[in-house]
Amino acid sequence: MANVDTEPKWYILHTYSGYEAMVKESLLRLIENNNLQDSIVDIKIPMEQTIEERANGKKKVVERKLLPCYVFIKMIYSNQLWYLVTNTRGVTGFCGPQGRPQPMKEDEIRKMRLEEYVVNADFKTGDRVSIDNGPLEGFIGTIREVNDETQRAKVTIVMFGREQDVEVEYVQMQKISPEATEIPNEEET
């Protein structure tokens, strides 16, 4: 490999089922013990929030792995790092041709939300928004509270016939015009 990358890129690691958190912890120890902070920049296990109904009829928001058996690692590729990472307990290998890592494309990184993209949004309390991404996709609500530092807002939506406050990231929602807030009644359709 004549051209050695100098910029870290995102790669996908395949792991045994249920070993994702252990692999992440082992890789963090590997970075610390071998002083690899400049070579391995980030490790993520993408999670999503889902609404789960319990046997007693109560609903609960639960975090689940978006892609079980996969861990995402941002690193500057080298043969030495390939060896260290693939010999980590629980790792079956990199996703790519013949087990060699293939960097992820920019649109894949954005879709998996591995990078924090700063959104210059002018959301404020009282704005009507539609949620365009995540488990609450399709809901329309009103912003109750904004936090520009974390880029999240508390939004009141109507779920299961009741008003519910949920936390939504700025990148998951978009402001809607006051004319578009009218939702057809279920009886009218």
Image (cartoon, rainbow, N blue to C red):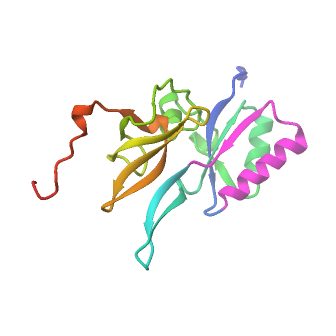
Query: Would residue 32 be counted in the magenta stretch?
Result: yes
Q: Is residue 72 above or below residue 187?
A: above
Front one among 59 and 179:
179
Q: From the image, which quarter does the C terminus lie in?
A: bottom left
Q: Is residue 108 above or below residue 51?
A: above
Front one among 81 and 163:
163
**Relative to 126, 117 lies left or right:** right
Q: In percent of the image, x 59 and y 32: which residue is there?
A: 116
Q: Is residue 31 visible?
A: yes
Residue 175 is situated, as x and y percent measured from the top left of the image, at 36, 32
Q: Quadrant of residue 55?
A: bottom left
* Residue situated furthest bottom in the rendering: 56
For the record, the magenta segment spans 19-46
Number of numbered discs? 0
Q: Is residue 66 visible?
A: no
Residue 129 is situated, as x and y percent measured from the top left of the image, at 36, 37
**Relative to 54, 104 lies left or right:** right
